[in-house]
């Protein structure tokens, strides 16, 4: 990364390896229940703490036990920097850092602190301000430069530390480093206060959105309107819907019989048209259930969701083989995560003419709902005509008997007190939530007349439009805050943030102090190593990846293989060996994890 540094005579750009005193891998150790005098209980900071540091500040760190000899070189002290060398993901590259400052050490439990072997401990000479270095690491990561030092797969990335250690560090005189850190902290504090206020407003808008929905579906939003307009009872609407459903079924049956006759007359060539399924009926809601549901106006009626639906299905399995760069849209759960369809990022499928599953064709007036995964229960209303599109097996397609009710359903299932709560109460499964089509059909629905539905939609959408605009403004403000944060750091590392003092000792002299301190440290370590008695205990054999896998009868997590192999201190060597024996290894994805086994 190039910088236009002013006063170049006072700044230098040495490599990271020139300024760091030492780097060492972490130690995951053993369970704290171990009874061994050679072990000591510690607080072990993991990759998950690094990823959520701004929120948890390491408070979720794990209690482990490591050898006392390991603790001697790995115990964290003020000024240390932890560098993430394994983990990350497609949207979050590996390489985040955390500074262990005085505040961190004071609020964490009073135990020795170490880091896991997914991290590296970087310790710097006292002649340099590690807060200044960590600010540069933050800037380097956020700039996107870190992706040039990535290895491994999207699901388990690793940092190529040997290459990363060659990055250039803009090194200012020590006094100027201190002034830069103080100024950045001052400016960031102001930014953080602004961001906190924006996020508070963001959360308040979410609360207000849900309050509006609750107000609507308990009938209070249209209470005055009902008095003035005297709409028909929901019972009458339900009767008309049932008649319409039967008429639609009879028409489909008639058309099917005509199609079969035409097929027979044509010598039974081609595929016979399938007989339309008779609409499914559910038992009315039992009194015990009705007594537990929220109150609604007397002319409204609690019914089953199935009572207003003509057709419900989910997408077909195994359509990945039809993925293409063009074709029909293939809608997945991630395309509905905001309660609206974001089709721009949908996948494409190029389907054969007679492929099974074209029943999941999406049309205007349909309602889509996610039925598996973290986003289960999210809904999207197909308000306008849509290009040829199909849903995946993780998305349900609902076709109401009368599409006029769809926008009402869309709002109803977004309510945390009404439809959304009903759906969540029917979800099952641990780890990966699932909603069956039958469960979705049986969910209770608060029904009112079409006229009142239209009034609810009108008033809610008017308020939601205001909320949406405010949320966009807040989101824009948050993005500008992050851009400003980067701008401040960029200015800092260009030497333009604080006034420079010609009396400051230049970075060239500072580098000499750093090198002298490093030399002294290495000499002390060398002497201590000489004084330590030789360990006569026979070391256990270091295992290759292949040898580790031979010890297990079942597939192993990639990270477990790494930690049991001879490469536990160097993930780059682990990936190198893995690449060399790729033909002998079978890899299976399990969520975001990789399971490894030997090819049999």
Image (cartoon, rainbow, N blue to C red):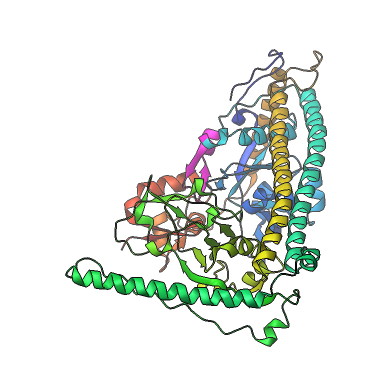
Q: Quadrant of the C terminus?
A: bottom left
* Residue located at (79% from left, 37% from top): 191
Percent x, y of residue 540: 48, 59
Residue 539 in view: no
* Residue located at (40% from left, 72% from top): 251
**Quarter where residue 422 is shown:** bottom right
Asked whether, in this view, residue 52 is left or right of residue 165, the answer is: right
* Residue located at (56% from left, 43% from top): 93
Percent x, y of residue 140: 62, 33
Percent x, y of residue 26: 61, 50
Asked whether, in this view, residue 314 is left or right of residue 146, the answer is: left
Give above or below for 541 relative to 163: below
Q: Nearer the viewer, residue 241 or 74?
A: 241
Q: Nearer the viewer, residue 428 or 155?
A: 428
Name the outermost residue toward the left.
Answer: 267
* Magenta region includes residue 219: no
Magenta-tinted stretch: 148-164
């Amino acid at each position: 990364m190039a910088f236009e540094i002013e006063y170049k005579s006072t700044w230098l750009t040495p490599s990271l390896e020139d300024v760091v005193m030492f780097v060492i891998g972490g130690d995951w150790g053993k369970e704290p229940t171990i009874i061994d005098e050679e072990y000591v209980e510690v607080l072990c900071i993991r990759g998950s703490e690094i990823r959520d540091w701004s929120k948890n500040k390491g408070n979720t760190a794990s209690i482990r036990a490591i050898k006392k000899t390991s603790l001697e070189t790995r115990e964290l002290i003020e000024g240390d920097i932890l560098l993430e060398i394994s983990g990350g993901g497609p949207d979050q590259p590996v390489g985040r850092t955390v500074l262990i400052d005085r505040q961190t050490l004071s609020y964490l439990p009073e135990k020795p602190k170490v880091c896991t072997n997914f991290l590296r401990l970087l310790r710097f000479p006292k002649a340099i301000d590690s807060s200044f270095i960590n600010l540069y690491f933050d800037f380097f990561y956020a700039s996107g430069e870190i992706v040039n030092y990535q290895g491994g797969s999207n699901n388990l990335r690793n940092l190529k530390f040997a290459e990363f250690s060659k990055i250039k560090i803009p090194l200012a005189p020590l006094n100027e480093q201190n002034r830069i850190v103080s100024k950045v902290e001052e400016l960031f504090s102001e930014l953080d206060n602004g961001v906190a206020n924006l996020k508070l407003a963001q959360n308040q808008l979410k609360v207000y959105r849900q309050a509006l929905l609750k107000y609507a579906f308990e009938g209070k939003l249209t209470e005055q309107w009902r008095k003035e307009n005297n709409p028909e009872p929901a019972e009458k609407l339900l009767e008309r819907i049932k008649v319409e459903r039967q008429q639609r079924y009879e028409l489909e049956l008639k058309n099917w019989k005509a199609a079969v006759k035409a097929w027979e007359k044509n010598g039974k060539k081609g595929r016979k048209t399938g007989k339309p399924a008779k609409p499914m009926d559910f038992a009315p809601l039992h009194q015990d259930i009705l007594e537990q549901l929220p109150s609604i106006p007397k002319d409204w009626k609690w019914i089953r969701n199935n009572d207003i639906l003509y057709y419900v299905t989910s997408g077909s399995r195994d359509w990945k083989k039809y993925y293409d760069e063009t074709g029909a849209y293939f809608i997945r759960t991630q395309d509905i995560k905001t309660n609206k369809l974001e089709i721009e990022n949908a996948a494409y499928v190029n389907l054969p003419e007679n492929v099974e599953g074209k029943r999941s064709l999406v049309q205007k007036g349909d309602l889509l709902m996610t039925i598996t995964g973290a986003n289960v229960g999210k809904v999207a209303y197909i308000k306008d005509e849509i290009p040829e599109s199909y849903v995946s097996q993780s998305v349900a397609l609902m076709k109401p008997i009368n599409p006029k009710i769809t926008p009402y359903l869309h709002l109803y299932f977004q309510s945390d007190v009404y439809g959304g709560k009903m759906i969540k109460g029917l979800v099952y499964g641990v780890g990966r939530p699932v909603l069956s089509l039958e469960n979705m059909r049986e969910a209770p629905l608060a029904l009112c007349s079409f006229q009142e539905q239209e009034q609810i939609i009108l008033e809610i959408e008017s308020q939601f439009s205001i909320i949406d605009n405010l949320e966009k403004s807040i989101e824009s403000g948050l993005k500008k805050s992050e851009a400003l944060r980067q701008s401040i750091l960029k200015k800092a590392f260009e030497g333009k943030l604080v006034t420079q003092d010609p009396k400051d000792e230049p970075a060239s002299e500072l580098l000499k102090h750093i090198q002298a301190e490093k030399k002294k440290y290495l000499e002390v370590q060398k002497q201590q190593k000489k004084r330590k008695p030789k360990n006569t205990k026979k070391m256990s054999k270091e295992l290759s990846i292949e040898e580790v896998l031979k010890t297990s009868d079942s597939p192993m997590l990639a990270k477990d293989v790494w930690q049991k192999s001879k490469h536990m201190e160097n993930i780059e060597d682990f990936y190198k060996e893995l690449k060399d024996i790729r033909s002998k290894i079978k890899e299976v994805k399990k969520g975001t994890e990789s399971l490894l086994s030997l090819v049999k």
